[in-house]
Amino acid sequence: MVDTTNPILKDCKNDNSKLKIWVKSLTDDLLKQRLILTACNFAKKFHKSDIDHLIKVTDILAQLGMNTDVLIAGILHDIVETQPTLLDEIEQRFGSKVSQLVDGVDKMKFIEELNDNKHKVIHNKVDTERLRNMLLAMAEDVRVILIKLADRLDNMRALRDHNVEKQRRIARETLDLFAPLANRLGMWQIKWELEDWSLRYLEPENYKEIAQFLDERRVDREKYIQQVLDKLLLALDNAGIKAELSGRPKHIYSIWRKMKKKGLDFQEVFDVRAVRVIVNTIPECYATLRIVHQQWQPLPTEFDDYISNPKPNNYQSLHTAVIGPDKKIFEVQIRTDEMHNHAEFGVASHWRYKEGDSEYNDNFEQRLAGLRHILQWNDEDGDVNDFLEQFKSDMFDENVYVLSPQGQVIDLPQGSKPLDFAYALHSKLGHRCNGVKVNNKKVPLNYSLKSGDVVNILTIKEESPKRYWLTQPDHLKTKEARDSIRNWFKKQDNKQHILDGRQLLDCLLQCLNIQNYKIDNLAEQLNIDSVNELLAAIGRGEIAMKRIADTFKQEINLTPYVDIEVIADDKIGLLGEISEMFSQENINILATNTKTNKTENRAYLKYELEVNNITELTGILLKIDNLDCVVKVWRNK
């Protein structure tokens, strides 16, 4: 494998003179040089003066063209692992952007923790895909991912110093998680090196065999490619096309993968011989393609137009394979300089050589928004149509990725609540839920989960789901959780369902101030055979209260203006809480009257409301009735 480490950093260690030479190679700006050196000296305090790894990570970021903030974050990226309070000092010394990047990278360390021998999270493609999605979903700034990838790349370069077991574990994780992530972000340079290093430790014999074949035939291959380049350059000059031509390096992992997938010997992998042509414009790309096909016979099955149909990670290029001299097949890639820049550096290309807020633009933000969906396309060799279908289905329902205390990753729809998480793990866990902790802090059941949250469901011994979980719109998001709760109530004793249904119906009749109502009339209107079956269905949660209220239209002759009364325990903020409910339901308050009885500690409230229909009235009455402090609420005739 070609060593791509910056030669300035060879044995740099703590040599301050070499360190200064390296910093000068990054930028001519004296102020930025001082900032980077200051960051190096700051990092030395927490690394026993050895910051070799941090410098190499930062050099990778510099090769990607990252700006000064990112370079400084690269130097400081792992010093807060055991000292979180350092973030404040980092912000004071180097600014909020640097501290946010460092904090983001520190949060990414959970990947290694999840994949250690204790948790063994990565079992299959689904688990790996969840981790990749979670990683990007947690990164508020995509440059956090770039720093993490640079960190992993330097770790892979230094992996030879570790034992075989660790080499294989980290190589497997890299090939499963980080290399595909680099690919999704279009970072080809980092992707191929991560893949080659991984293969070196996972398939050492195959790796050595292919490397030896490449080395033995290198001189002949280079001579052959130069012959092709000379002929093509002359043809392009005659056509008035200025182009940059080069032999394209073929990487060991991609050769091994093609041999394995197609059952080929090394000699049969024709794109070991490859040429890259970089021109100025898209029309020149197609003109060059025509010239290539005029010079050598093309293989029709080996042509791909990724300019008209870019890959999901926005990669663009023309690919063709032709029969060259001596009837040997070689591959040609044709692209513009802009396409080449994106192909080499992916999303990093949008920050290259830019400083400050100017590094963002609306078009780029829109492209980044699609990256989370792109990550869900797992098969690199799958049909593009498969990806598009996946993209369409996920476009309007982005997921969040949360963890159990044991490190299991669960993906849920955006806006999911702790109960959704509990039922996703196991229905019995949901039934026994009695509270929740998120990131070791107690939160209410209507807390909206975020990617990266560690969720611990607090339980009681007996299964006891609550009916109000179904009626409160901010307690559940997923249909699966709702169905589990409804199914639980269906299985309970029918007598209890009837009692519960009677209680709920009586509450509704009281709220609407309907008296002397014959329940068998309601059963008949709803096409239910008996009163007990009706009450049991209400008790099981199969019939919504608003649906029942709709049947009372004849009993009430509702007007646009309705009086309601509330009796409640007197408490501070009661009026504001009820008024907020009216506001949330878009119900207009025409008049209000309030009295309190300090002896009884009771509040007596009267409201004149403007409502559109009985369904709207029922909804607000039931919502008020669900308040713990409310003793009674009803519609006044």
Image (cartoon, rainbow, N blue to C red):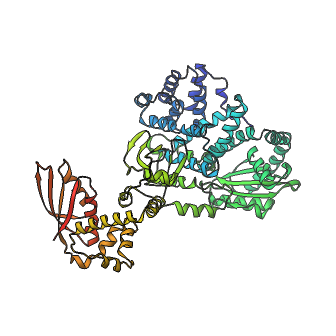
Locate residue 619 relative to residue 16 in the image: left or right: left
Q: Residue at x 72, y 50 (%)?
A: 276
Locate residue 560 relative to residue 96 in the image: left or right: left
Counting from the top left corner in percent of width and height, residue 595 is at 10, 55
Counting from the top left corner in percent of width and height, residue 227 is at 82, 49
Q: Residue at x 14, y 57 (%)?
A: 604
Residue 613 location, quadrant: bottom left
Locate residue 240 relative to residue 562 in the image: left or right: right
Is residue 506 visible in the rendered image? The answer is yes
Counting from the top left corner in percent of width and height, residue 431 is at 45, 53
Camera-side residue: 369 or 623?
A: 623
Counting from the top left corner in percent of width and height, residue 44 is at 53, 22
The relative height of residue 544 versus residue 410 in the rendered view (above or below) is below
The relative height of residue 343 versus residue 566 in the rendered view (above or below) is above
Residue found at the far right of this picture? 326
Camera-side residue: 523 or 403?
A: 523
Is residue 308 visible in the rendered image? The answer is no
The relative height of residue 52 versus residue 228 in the rendered view (above or below) is above
Camera-side residue: 301 or 430?
A: 430
> How many numbered callouts?
0
Name the image quarter holding the C terminus. bottom left
Residue 189 location, quadrant: top right
The relative height of residue 522 versus residue 468 in the rendered view (above or below) is below
Camera-side residue: 96 or 27?
A: 96
Name the image quarter holding the N terminus. top right
